[in-house]
């Protein structure tokens, strides 16, 4: 039976019950989690899931209802056999290896028998059931979707930057999917021609132009509730790597709408001297932003171990390992000069790290760290750029102040930055935010991400950097599984590959003439921005 037919059958199935022996633990199941949404050609259905400790599990009898499976338990051997189309899957309680038609498959956690029910991890669906179906299954655990068969469900990553006089909403849509943006009753509606959308965690609204972001499954699309200061919007798009598109929605304040009317010069009075044509503007001798040098900062080192994992892994060793890999990859693949703030296990002062970047005239500054939490289950990478709220009105004034322009021989001008060392970064917040978005988007494709994957914070190491700068928390070393991941070549290579791709995309972004990328670009000064207080990285 085709998977779409299986899903239709689910609605009519009643009374599918299994009788189990008393074998196994009697630990009670915790409250149900939000469940998996099953998307197929015939519609959508909720598959209940259960939170048990740190794992989300699904009851095997619920899967049997959905996919018309036969279950046969061997109480003496603590096993259960799942049969589908004469193909057998054999599970053993508390063993994370299962036999799928004679082939061993590893699951993220072990099946268990609890309260007379067999529970399996979510990846059982894609790793064990999926290979046996004709149409295939795709599990997207972060968005809690299970895709059945040939359905079109694009991934949508959304970011929002608020400004004093508007805001900028960017959506990366992978793969490119037909869409429309319309305004309806105080909302903007982004509607997709798809079976559903796979939306990363939506950004938090800030400022007075947006009050809420909401994913609307029925459309499918995203609704953006508009604030009182909203006046108009402008939509643009540009291609992105891997058949994706980046959709940008610029919000403007009420009264700031532009018109297409061309201003005209009045005719001079009869007998008056004719108007002189304006002089040709002087050529612009200022260099366009580019990426010719990158400083990679391996967090901590020497006397500063940084965070420590439950098995003793140290943050300082992991950051240095990734920094070296990233340096080698950038130099060999992109031909860009790379400087490490440290190449050994040595102590480097926080301000000295920014000084190294400034003295080497770096075009990007990337600070590498790992996170820690009192919750062992906390996981996922985060990308930060500077928040200036903690630095008072001086920082705001410096962010708004234009550079002093002085004439140069041969015509044109050159901008001279006359700002305090400890306020250098405020001039680059716009580009830092853009680079942070690209890093987050590329990381999300290859490594686990936090629910709030992009944030602003007052990190000391970023304040003095006189170039676009981000700080990357690559995951939680306090999580036993992630601590083990950190030591693997595959995980470190995935981080490096993601950063390489984000650098390439940022370099392409700088080449776009319409970006207006002067160092005085308006920074994110909206009030109420979410930030982490008092962190001294």
Image (cartoon, rainbow, N blue to C red):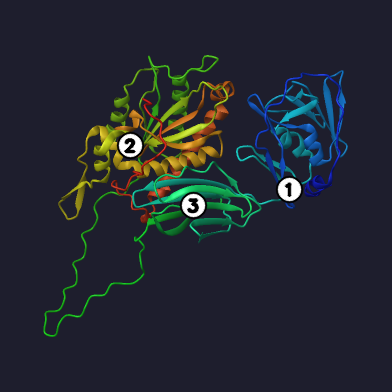
Residue 387, percent across and down?
36, 36
Residue in the picture at 79% in, 39% down: 132
Q: Of marks 3 and 1, which one's residue comes earlier in the chain?
A: 1
Q: Is residue 313 above or below residue 505?
A: above
Q: Nearer the viewer, residue 304 or 503?
A: 304
x, y percentage for residue 311?
A: 55, 14
The residue wearing badge 1 is: 149
**Is residue 459 something one can see in this rendering?**
yes
The disc placed on residue 225 is 3
- Residue placed most toward the observer, 202 or 461: 202
| Residue drawn 55% across the image and 29% down it | 491
* Whether residue 64 is situated above or below residue 299 in the rendered picture: below
> Badge 2 local density, few (<14 within 10 Å), some, or many (20+)?
some
Please tell me how crowded label 3 is: few (under 14), some (14-19), or many (20+) other residues with Cα within 10 Å: some
* Crowding at mark 1 (Cα within 10 Å: few <14, some 14-19, many 20+): some
Where residue 82 appears, x then y in whole percent?
A: 83, 32
Reply above or below: 417 against 227.
above
Task: Choose the circle earlier in sequence order: 2 or 1.
Answer: 1
Image spot of residue 150 (x, y percent): 71, 50
In this view of the protein, which residue sits in the foreground, 113 or 88? 113
Residue carrying label 2: 389
Element type where label 1 sits in the image: loop
Quadrant into which the C terminus falls? top left
Secondary element at image label 3: strand
Residue at the spot x=70%, y=34% of the render? 49
Say what secondary structure mark 2 lies in.
helix
Q: Is residue 244 visible?
A: no
Q: Earlier in the sequence, mark 3 or mark 2?
A: 3
The residue sitting at 83% across, 26% down in the picture is 80
Locate residue 467 relative to residue 407 in the image: left or right. Answer: right
- The picture quadrant where one finds residue 339 is top left
């Amino acid at each position: 039976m085709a998977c779409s037919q299986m899903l239709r059958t689910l609605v009519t199935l009643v009374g599918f019950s299994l009788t189990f022996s008393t074998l196994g633990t009697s630990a009670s199941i915790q409250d149900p989690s939000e469940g998996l949404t099953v998307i197929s050609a015939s519609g959508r259905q909720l598959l209940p899931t259960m939170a048990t400790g740190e794992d989300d599990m699904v009851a095997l009898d619920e899967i049997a209802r959905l996919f018309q499976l036969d279950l046969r338990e061997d109480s003496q051997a603590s096993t259960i056999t799942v049969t589908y189309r004469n193909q057998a899957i054999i599970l053993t309680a508390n063993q994370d290896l299962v036999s799928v038609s004679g082939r061993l498959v590893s699951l993220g956690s072990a099946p268990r028998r609890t309260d007379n029910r067999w529970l399996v991890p979510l990846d059982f669906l894609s790793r064990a059931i999926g290979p046996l179906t004709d149409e295939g299954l795709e599990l997207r655990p972060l968005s809690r979707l299970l895709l059945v068969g040939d359905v079109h469900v694009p991934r949508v990553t959304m970011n929002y930057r608020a400004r004093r006089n508007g805001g900028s909403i960017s959506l990366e849509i992978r793969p490119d999917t037909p869409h429309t943006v319309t305004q309806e009753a105080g909302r903007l509606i982004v509607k997709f021609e798809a079976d559903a959308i796979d939306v990363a965690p939506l950004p938090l609204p800030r400022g007075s132009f947006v009050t809420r972001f909401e994913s609307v499954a029925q459309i499918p699309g995203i609704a953006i509730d508009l604030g009182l200061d909203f006046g108009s919007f402008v939509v643009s798009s540009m291609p992105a790597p891997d058949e994706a598109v980046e959709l940008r929605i610029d919000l403007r304040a009420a009264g700031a709408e532009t018109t297409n009317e061309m201003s005209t010069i009045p005719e001079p009075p009869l007998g008056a001297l004719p108007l002189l044509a304006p002089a040709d503007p002087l050529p612009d001798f200022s260099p366009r932003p580019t990426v010719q040098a990158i400083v990679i900062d391996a967090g901590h080192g020497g006397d500063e171990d940084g965070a420590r994992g439950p098995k003793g892994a140290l943050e300082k060793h992991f950051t240095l390992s990734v920094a070296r890999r990233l340096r080698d990859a950038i130099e060999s693949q992109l031909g860009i000069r790379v400087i490490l703030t440290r190449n050994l296990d040595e102590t480097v002062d926080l301000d000295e790290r920014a000084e190294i970047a400034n003295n080497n005239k770096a075009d990007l500054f990337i600070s590498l760290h790992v996170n820690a939490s009192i919750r062992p289950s906390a996981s996922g990478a985060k990308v930060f750029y500077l928040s200036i709220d903690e630095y008072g009105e001086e920082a705001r004034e410096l962010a708004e102040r234009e550079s002093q322009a002085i004439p140069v021989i041969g015509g044109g001008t050159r901008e001279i930055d006359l700002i305090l060392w400890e306020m250098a970064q405020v001039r680059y917040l716009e580009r830092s935010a853009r680079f942070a978005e690209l890093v987050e988007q590329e990381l999300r494709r290859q490594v686990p991400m936090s629910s709030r994957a992009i944030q602003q914070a007052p990190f000391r190491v970023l304040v003095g950097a006189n170039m676009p700068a981000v700080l990357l928390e690559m995951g939680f070393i306090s999580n036993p599984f992630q601590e083990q991941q950190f030591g693997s070549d595959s995980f470190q290579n995935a981080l490096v590959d993601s950063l390489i791709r984000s650098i390439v995309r940022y370099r392409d972004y700088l080449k776009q003439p319409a970006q207006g990328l002067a160092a005085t670009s308006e920074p994110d000064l909206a009030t109420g921005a979410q930030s982490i207080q008092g962190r001294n990285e």
